[in-house]
Image (cartoon, grey):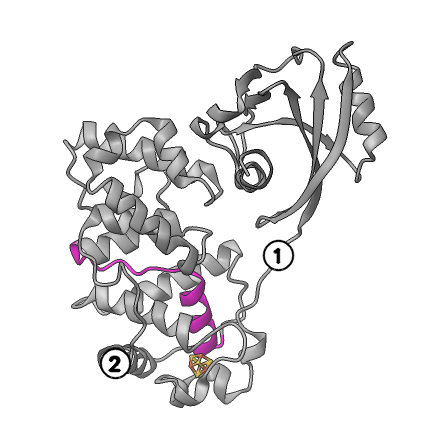
Amino acid sequence: MATKAQYVFFRESLMRWHREQNDRSLPWKGERNAYRIWLSEIILQQTRAAQGLDYYLKFTRTYPDIRSLAAAPDEEVFRLWQGLGYYNRCRNMLATARFISDTYQGRFPDTYDEILALKGVGPYTAAAIASFAFDLPHAVVDGNVYRVLSRFFAIETPVDSTEGKRIFASLAQELIDADSPAAYNQAIMDLGATVCTPAAPLCMFCPLAERCAAYRQNLTGLLPVKEKKLSVQTRHFNYVVMRSGDSVWIRQRKEKGIWQDLHEFLLIETPEAATLKQIEKEIKQLTTARVALRHIGSLRQRLTHQLILSEFYEAQLSAQLTVPDTEGFWVDISELQRFAFPKTMVSFIAAHLHG
Ligand code: SF4
């Protein structure tokens, strides 16, 4: 059972380290503008900071305030987002920008409950905006915070269980320095990112080591505990670039999922890796035109829950065809850059169609 003295030690040691030693630098650190904090948090969900940085700079340059983002055409915003994946985030971001622009006349809401009610904003992002922009005492709980707390207090309840989420959220809230919530939240996340790292934490240099239960009991490798191991599903995508003269066939994905609303070439998903003959058979079922099919490349893409193995084929057709049950259309190759595509497609287009 944690004692009051432990709480005080934790808070004071962490804040001292933050003032005197924390030198982690991030472009959005110390930011007080709610719009920019929100943007950085949305971009960083499921994205590494190094990769997110370019996007954050691009977005803040192109859309300096929430009204300019709200007024931008969907297609332009999707193109800027291209490569970050998880397009639901982009859709929610746009919906929220427009909602704030209409409902709050472009002024970012300044209470925790109003922020939490925004589309695409969960408790972590709401606490980050509330504390960093408005100095409200709401504790952030992300992977770094789970790790530091579970180790310091030796809590073995799985961090991804309902019970664990409740325990850690309430502990984090009790620990927060109510006089400096922004600095406290930054400090604990930075400590988790730079000192109390997932593998090989730097306990020797940690301001919490003296009273850290995991360090003293040699449990750092066992904490935090997770209930579910991530299972990764392998999917086999066969993209067929159907060409007829200088035109190619594309379609907009309407299916719910990570690539909703983006464009793609003809996609044939197969349960196992397919052969050229199998793909050729599929195409021939669509048309009586002459078809010359060849394999032109492969791509691997690792998402959180999926490994996508994509094979690309080019099908030269003697005449344009209509693919049933799709709203696909033919476009000139020079026009392709007007359409937003998933990352795999962009690499492909750059390497094979424009080069
Ligand atoms: S002493 Fe080690 S395990 Fe404990 S909080 Fe510090 S870095 Fe993490």
- The span from disc 1 to disc 2 (Cα, nearest Å) is 34 Å
Q: Residue at x 53, y 35 (%)?
A: 354
Q: Secondary structure at mark 2?
A: helix
Indicate the position of residue 252 as horizontal and vertical percent values. 53, 23
The answer to whether residue 131 is left or right of residue 227 is: left
- Residue occupied by mark 2: 12
Quarter holding ligand 1: bottom left
- Where is residue 214 drawn, in percent x and y? 50, 82
Question: Badge 1: how crowded within 10 Å, few (<14), some, or many (20+)?
Answer: few
Disc 2 residue type? Glu
Q: Which mark is residue 192?
A: none
Image height check: is 168 above or below 341?
A: below
- List the single residue furthest toward the right: 277
Query: Tag 1: residue type?
Result: Lys
**SS at circle 1:** loop
Residue 305 among magenta residues: no
Name the quadrant containing residue 30.
bottom left
- Quadrant for the N terminus, please: bottom left
* Magenta segment boundaries in residue numbering: 134-154
Q: Earlier in the sequence, mark 1 or mark 2?
A: 2
Q: What residue sits 21% from the left and 58% below the top?
A: 31
Viewer-nearest residue: 321 or 63: 321
User: Where does the image place residue 45, in percent across and percent down from the top left?
Assistant: 42, 50
List the residue tagged with mark 1.
Answer: 228
Is ligand 1 within 8 Å of the beta carbon of the residue shown at mark 2? no
Q: Could you say which quadrant of the image residue 272 lies in?
A: top right
Q: Quadrant of the C terminus?
A: top right
For this view, does 145 lie left or right of residue 20? right
Question: Residue 4 location in percent, x, y?
Answer: 30, 79
Q: In the image, what residue occupies the spot 46% across and 70% down?
A: 147
Q: Is mark 1 within 8 Å of ligand 1?
A: no
